[in-house]
Image: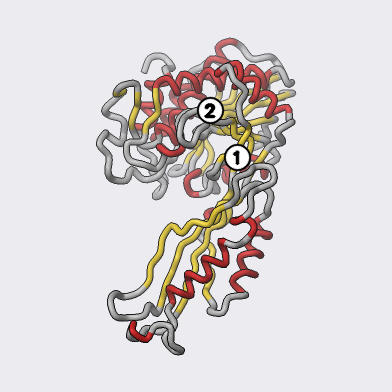
Amino acid sequence: MTALDVVELTQALVAAASPNPPGDERAACAVLAAAVEGLPGVRVRRYGSELRPTVVAAAGSDAPAHSTLLAAHLDTVALGTGWTTDPLGADGVLDGRLFGRGTTDIKGGAAAMAVAFADAVSRGLPSDVRLLLAGNADEEAGGRQGWGVVLREWDERPTAAIVAEPSGIDAPWEALWVGARGSSRFSLRARGVGTHSSLAGRPGAESAFEALEAALAALRALPLCSEDHPRWGSRGRLTVVRVEAGDGWGRVPESATAEVEIRVAPGPTQAEVEDAIHETLATLESPVELAWAPRGLRWIAPSSVAADSELAAVGRSAWRATFGAEPPLRCFPGGTDAYLLQEAGIPALIAGPGALRRAHHPDEYVTVEELHDAVRLYTALLDGLLELR
């Protein structure tokens, strides 16, 4: 790769497999760092552990009046099965599409950010501006080994950030995300009496699975899962991602377990959500055991920026300049690294190529057109943010 081309860089990043779990972003970080560290005045630093690095490239003033961060995670979910194309992108571009794990979530966005970063540096930054590009670890597992580490080690606090995630659900460029849902993750275990299934429903023949069903129904009735959000419209949602129960025919299940996540719209705190879960489970006729998910998966906070903020205004203007239309301002349905940046006082918009429905799926892809559109959008965002200083 002799020049910083967005398609070639996306292909190189996809070829540098970085599934999480188990978590190893070294190869992808090396690709991104190599793409920009030779640019005039650019300094690249690595944070985190040797196995779980995050790379940050910096250009411009060391004492800025304004600094902007472009951030994209370099980890992906596992390659998985069911592919008809090469999951590491070896098939190249087919009918205008680049296939491979991470193309839409979000190595295509990382490549587009790198190209926009390189363009801004080559054009020259104002003397009082600092520009940062980050390829971070661990977003797919909550981010605590990515931005969670960097923000503890970092002496930077950018004025504003753009976080790369697909800007559409079913199709590209559906909305500018000014918020993102968070998630609460936990497991439930119910116990019953393992006896003859013909006795189910009688005293002393309680089904663990029926007790689990009652617990899930009670949680789904919580306002955070059942009522539309006054600003975002979309409500939270409880989803069972794994369930185990019973031994088979003829026997009442004596144990039933569900792994659960509740997607939470911006607003509630971790304490408020977890208190509501505890209080609901305490009202059940048949008790269930609650265990929170390990490490950073237990709670990923929602994030948002005000729709009337300067950052949102820049986002709307950049979107109009790129696509010739006013963007809907909406809430991203998934979790993003923006919540960790928000915790550190760094406001973030969320935007990028691809569509969420393609992510975490066989034959994931991004189109060449979307990659070039993303470069244009990120460039317009940087131009607008530079004017805020």
SS class, disc 2 = strand
At a point 39% along the width and 35% down the height, the residue shown is 27
**Which residue is disc 2 drawn over?**
44
SS class, disc 1 = strand
Q: Nearer the viewer, residue 125 or 205?
A: 205
Q: Amino acid at mark 1?
A: Cys
At a point 36% along the width and 18% down the height, the residue shown is 1
At a point 36% along the width and 34% down the height, the residue shown is 16
Residue 23 locus on image (x, y percent): 42, 46
> What is the quadrant of residue 298 in the picture?
bottom right
Rendered view: 388 above or below 123: below
At a point 55% along the width and 18% down the height, the residue shown is 323
Q: Amino acid at mark 2?
A: Val
**Which residue is disc 1 drawn over?**
331
Which residue is at the far bottom?
204
Disc 2 crowd, CA 10 A, few/some/many (<14, 14-19, 20+): some
Label at residue 110: none
Q: Nearer the viewer, residue 227 or 179?
A: 227
Which residue is at the far top?
123
Please give left or right for residue 308 compared with residue 96 in the image: right
Of labels 1 and 2, the one closer to you: 1
Q: Nearer the viewer, residue 1 or 306?
A: 306
* Tag 1 near tag 2, CB within 8 Å: no
Residue 358 locus on image (x, y percent): 40, 37
Which of pointers 1 and 2 lies earlier in the amino acid sequence? 2
Disc 1 crowd, CA 10 A, few/some/many (<14, 14-19, 20+): many
Question: Can residue 284 be seen in this snapshot?
Answer: yes
Rendered view: 211 above or below 78: below
Question: Can residue 135 be seen in this snapshot?
Answer: no
